Image (spheres, rainbow, N blue to C red):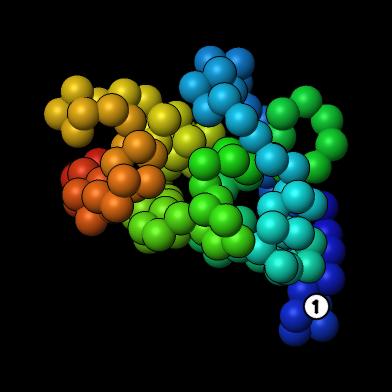
Amino acid sequence: MAGACGNGGFVTLTVAQIDRETDHLVGEWLPLSTVAKKLGLSIGRAKQLIKDKKLVGVRRGGGEPQIPAVFLAGDDVIKGLPGTLTVLADAGYGEVESIRWLFTSDDSLPGAPIDAIVAGRHTEVKRRAQALGF
């Protein structure tokens, strides 16, 4: 998929297809076009956020990539999410694996890592994600 980006070039975006189990963990999803509108960005710039690991999007059936709705707080990406996604990517996690890890309950947190990020405990979650790479 290609779209215009700010530098006059094109952003090529490869997005993984999500599995049913991970899809159910997430709950509410937003199409990339809706995410772009909420963030006040062009579609090309929203695609660049995915390519830069600031957001993660997947395919759910056909159509455009979709983003877990909880990744947005008002008109911004939730604090701590981009750094955590980068750490997960550095640990070798793909898009679907990152979403599964973020939304899977962890009794030691308690709750899922995404719940801790939303609650402002993103440093703790990022520390746990860094440990995955070892």
User: Element at badge 1?
Assistant: loop
Q: In the image, 87: left or right of 8?
A: left
Which residue is nearer to you in this view: 124 or 3? 124
* Residue 94 against residue 33 in the figure, above or below: above
* Residue 100 against residue 44 in the figure, above or below: above
* Residue 2 against residue 95 in the figure, above or below: below
Q: Quadrant of residue 111?
A: top left
Which quadrant does the C terminus fall into? top left
Q: Residue at 31% of width from left, 24% of height from top?
A: 105
Which residue is nearer to you in this view: 104 or 97? 104
> Which residue corresponds to mark 1?
9
Q: In the image, 75: left or right of 12?
A: left
Where residue 7 sits: x, y (%)?
75, 84
> In the current view of this chain or complex, which residue is farthest to the bottom?
7
Q: Amino acid at mark 1?
A: Gly
Whether residue 53 is visible, yes or no, is no
Q: Residue at 25% of width from left, 50% of height from top?
A: 121
Q: Residue at 80% of width from left, 77% of height from top?
A: 9
Q: In the image, 115: left or right of 17?
A: left
Q: Residue at 46% of width from left, 55% of height from top?
A: 78
Where residue 107 sits: x, y (%)?
19, 23
> In the current view of this chain or complex, which residue is farthest to the front?
74
Local crowd size for mark 1, using a 10 Å CA cut-off: few (<14), some (14–19), many (≥20): few
Where residue 45 sits: x, y (%)?
71, 68
